[in-house]
Image: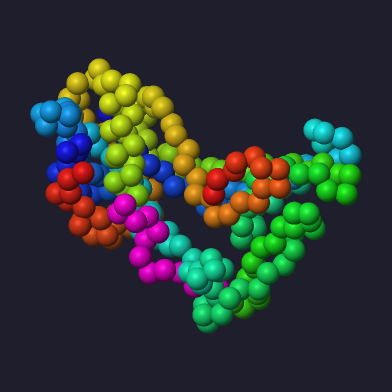
């Protein structure tokens, strides 16, 4: 295994993933903290149809307009007056995204080396109000990653 | 050390610039769009006019404590689609 997420917790408005990185022989390498802003709990992707077109709040496909004549012609969907976009209910960052970030960092350190040793520190962040408000919900969203081994 | 991820601020600080002209690089007036539902990086010649669109983004990193040192930064955009007329091997 490359790493294990040993804990997921809130810390000064940040969601923190405490991650143990391991050497190829399976021995412990070092521990690292990966943080995400609590405000991400309020960021939601717009819903699209099978063709990737954005939907309005009533479930219809949003209309398009030409923003630059071609070739190549550039079009974009727009929001008609009085309408809103339809959003997914879950935060937009999927758990796989967290794993991808940790995996990329692990591979980078494997290639470049890691001279810092096991520096187990975590700063006291200065959270904005949105981070504090969203942090608990985002921790719950990611709680399923605790204990995950990659 | 800590690895922190910041999403873009998604405010008027994010958007695109446009500049067009008969020669390349264009030297015309720079237009700024910050309220578009979609933004696009673009470089094209159309009707004898060269057009360049660049994107700009802003992050709120104010939560980083004073005295901390940023050793490296990566930018990872998610591109929804691409149009490529000259086989530039662009990837979305």
Q: Where residue A100 appears, x then y in whole percent?
A: 33, 44
Count of marks placed on residues: 0
Q: What stretch is highlighted in magenta?
A: A84-96
Is residue B17 something one can see in this rendering?
no
Point out the residue furthest to the top here. Answer: A115
Q: Does the stretch in magenta take in B38?
A: no
Is residue A66 something one can see in this rendering?
yes
Query: In the figure, is residue B62 to the left or right of B47?
Result: left
Q: Is the magenta stretch mostly helix, strand or loop?
A: loop
Point out the residue furthest to the front here. Answer: B87
- In this rendering, the answer to whether A148 lies above or below B3 is below
Point out the residue furthest to the left here. Answer: A27
- In this rendering, the answer to whether A60 lies above or below A31 is below
Query: Residue at image x 21%, y 52%?
Result: A145
Q: Where residue B37 appears, x then y in whole percent?
A: 61, 60
Query: Residue at image x 63%, y 43%?
Result: B55
Query: In the figure, is residue A69 to the left or right of A138?
Result: right
Q: Does the stretch in magenta take in A85?
A: yes
Query: In the figure, is residue A82 to the left or right of A143?
Result: right
Query: Residue at image x 14%, y 44%?
Result: A6
Q: Where residue B72 appears, x then y in whole percent?
A: 41, 27
Query: Residue at image x 79%, y 56%?
Result: A70
| Residue A66 placement: quadrant | bottom right
Q: Which of B41 and A32 is in front in this view?
A: B41
Q: Where residue B88 appears, x then y in whole percent?
A: 64, 40
Query: In the figure, is residue A71 to the left or right of A45?
Result: right
Q: In which quarter of the image is the N terminus of chain B?
A: top left
| Residue A107 placement: quadrant | top left
């Amino acid at each position: 295994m490359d790493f294990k997420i040993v804990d997921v917790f809130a810390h000064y408005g940040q969601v923190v993933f405490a991650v143990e990185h391991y050497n190829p022989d399976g021995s412990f390498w070092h521990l690292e903290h990966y943080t995400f802003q609590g405000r991400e709990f309020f960021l939601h992707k717009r819903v699209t149809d099978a063709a990737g077109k954005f939907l309005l709040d009533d479930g219809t496909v949003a209309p398009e307009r030409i923003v630059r004549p071609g070739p190549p012609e550039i079009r974009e969907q727009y929001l008609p007056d009085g309408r809103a976009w339809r959003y997914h209910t879950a935060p937009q960052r999927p758990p796989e995204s967290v794993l991808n970030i940790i995996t990329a960092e692990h591979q980078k350190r494997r290639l470049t080396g890691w001279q810092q040793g096991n520096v187990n520190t975590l700063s006291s962040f200065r959270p904005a109000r949105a981070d504090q408000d969203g942090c608990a919900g985002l921790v719950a969203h990611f709680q399923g990653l605790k204990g995950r081994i990659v | 050390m800590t690895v922190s991820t910041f999403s873009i601020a998604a405010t008027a600080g994010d958007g695109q610039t446009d500049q067009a002209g008969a020669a390349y690089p264009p030297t015309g007036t720079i237009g700024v769009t910050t309220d578009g539902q979609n933004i696009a990086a673009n470089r094209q010649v159309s009707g004898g006019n060269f057009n360049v669109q660049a994107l700009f983004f802003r992050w709120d990193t104010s939560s980083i404590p004073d005295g901390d040192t940023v050793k490296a930064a990566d930018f990872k955009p998610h591109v929804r689609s691409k149009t490529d007329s000259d086989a530039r091997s662009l990837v979305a």
